[in-house]
Image (spheres, grey):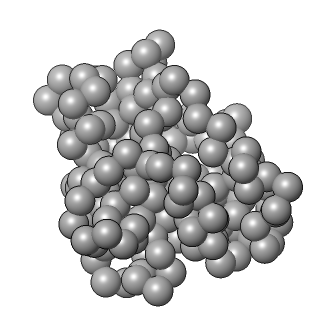
């Protein structure tokens, strides 16, 4: 398995991995299904503070994710993680998160975290296996105030 920078030639493939309205919303912010054709070319409007990656098995992409870099908060967030639905439940998500931790740690931020829908138990298990830990309840409550739902927030222990 190998982590590579995302190439736009894979946009349609990754969009096709979103098999529910909830997954489309996680990738695009729009709660629609199937993936809205009108945003197929714009959902990945990447800013300078976002790094996007594909995880490959040989020459086949199997997972997609982003690192959101925040200089002001001195943190990086793993975001918009998705695994090819045909390969879910095989440990690829855990391996993918571990692979994403390398550039996340190399970015030099003090904190690494992610948020996940509380009903996404399969993803939560993968993140915990990769070494993430739940944040304190009071911190999660504070971070959830501006959010549309109460996410489960997880943090990776750092030495910074």
Q: Residue 146 versus residue 76: which sits nearer the camera?
A: 76
Q: Residue 27 versus residue 143: which sits nearer the camera?
A: 27
**Can residue 80 be seen in the rendering of this structure?**
yes
Residue at position x 58%, y 28% in the image = 47
Location of residue 54 with respect to 45 vertically, above or below:
below
**Can residue 121 be seen in the rendering of this structure?**
no
Location of residue 1 with respect to 133 vertically, above or below:
below
Residue at position x 45%, y 44% in the image = 52
Residue at position x 80%, y 72% in the image = 33
Across and down, in percent, residue 66 comes to 46, 45
Across and down, in percent, residue 40 comes to 74, 56
From the viewer's perspective, tell me whether residue 129 is left or right of residue 115. left
From the viewer's perspective, tell me whether residue 84 is left or right of residue 13. left
Q: Residue 71 versus residue 151: which sits nearer the camera?
A: 71
Residue at position x 38%, y 19% in the image = 74
Q: Which quadrant holds residue 13? A: bottom right
């Amino acid at each position: 398995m190998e982590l590579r920078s995302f190439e736009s030639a894979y946009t349609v493939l990754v969009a096709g991995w979103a098999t529910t309205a909830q997954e489309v919303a996680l990738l695009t912010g729009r709660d629609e299904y199937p993936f809205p054709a009108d945003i197929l070319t714009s959902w990945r409007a990447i800013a300078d503070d976002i790094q996007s990656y594909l995880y490959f098995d040989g020459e086949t992409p199997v997972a997609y994710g982003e690192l959101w870099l925040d200089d002001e908060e001195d943190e990086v967030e793993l975001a918009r993680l998705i695994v090819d639905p045909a390969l879910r439940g095989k440990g690829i998500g855990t391996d993918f998160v571990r692979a994403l931790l390398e550039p996340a740690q190399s970015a030099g931020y003090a904190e690494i975290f992610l948020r996940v829908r509380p009903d996404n138990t399969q993803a939560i298990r993968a993140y915990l296996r990769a070494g993430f830990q739940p944040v304190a309840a009071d911190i999660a409550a504070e971070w959830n105030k501006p959010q549309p739902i109460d996410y489960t927030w997880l943090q990776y222990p750092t030495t910074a």
